Amino acid sequence: MGFGKIFWGFLFFFDFRIQGFDILPDIIGYWLIYSGLKELVSMGSHFAAAQKYTVVLGILSVFDLYQITMPIQQFSIGPLTGLIILLGIIVTILDLLMVYNLCHGIAEMAKGRGLSGLKTIALNRWKYYLYLRVATGVAVPLAILIPPLVMMLLIPLIGISILVFILMMGLMMQAEELLGWTNLRRRKLN
């Protein structure tokens, strides 16, 4: 089933850069998630909705392949900054919609198969992801406006974001194991 591809897609959302270049490009992650969702669209409308968002997110992620780095003291607000902020807001909203539909699709499948534990896990992972994105949306502007807060806000958020992405990847593995084709065949044989 497609959850394994989605698992690998989330791996590409870890942001590792060498001289500004993303060595785990998000565009590959969105393509993998799109491919995984393509296998799941017949399982529920949430997966079809999530798949639509991956297309737009994949296109927008091209702008994140290279990132210019500068000291925070040299940062200035201008017209380009406004465009970057608007793009960031759009990406955040689309990303939240994608993950919402993915987690709720898993919860719906789990409920249909009597897997209440997996349903609860999927809905909780959605909440963790939402909380992370909201916290990031508040912390980044605060850190830009008040540079001494950078270390106090962004360092913990990096750790929390790694944890949340690992939890999302774990959800995909559980969904693959409990909802995947192999499990379905095993149940039919018994």
Image (cartoon, grey):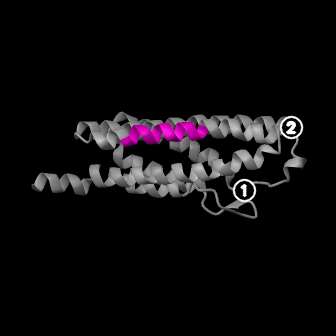
What residue range appears in magenta?
A: 121-133
Q: Secondary structure at mark 2?
A: loop
Q: How many marks?
A: 2
* CB contact under 8 Å: marks 2 and 1: no
In the image, residue 131 lies in the stretch drawn in magenta = yes
User: Which image quadrant is residue 117 in?
Assistant: top left
User: Which image quadrant is residue 48 in?
Assistant: top left
Residue 21: x, y in percent? 71, 61
Residue 175: x, y in percent? 34, 50
Crowd around label 1: few <14 · some 14–19 · many ≥20 (10 Å): some
- Quadrant position of the C terminus in the picture: bottom left
Residue 134: x, y in percent? 61, 35
Q: Secondary structure at mark 1?
A: loop
Q: Nearer the viewer, residue 156 or 69?
A: 156
> Where is mark 1, residue-wise?
66
> Where is mark 2, residue-wise?
77
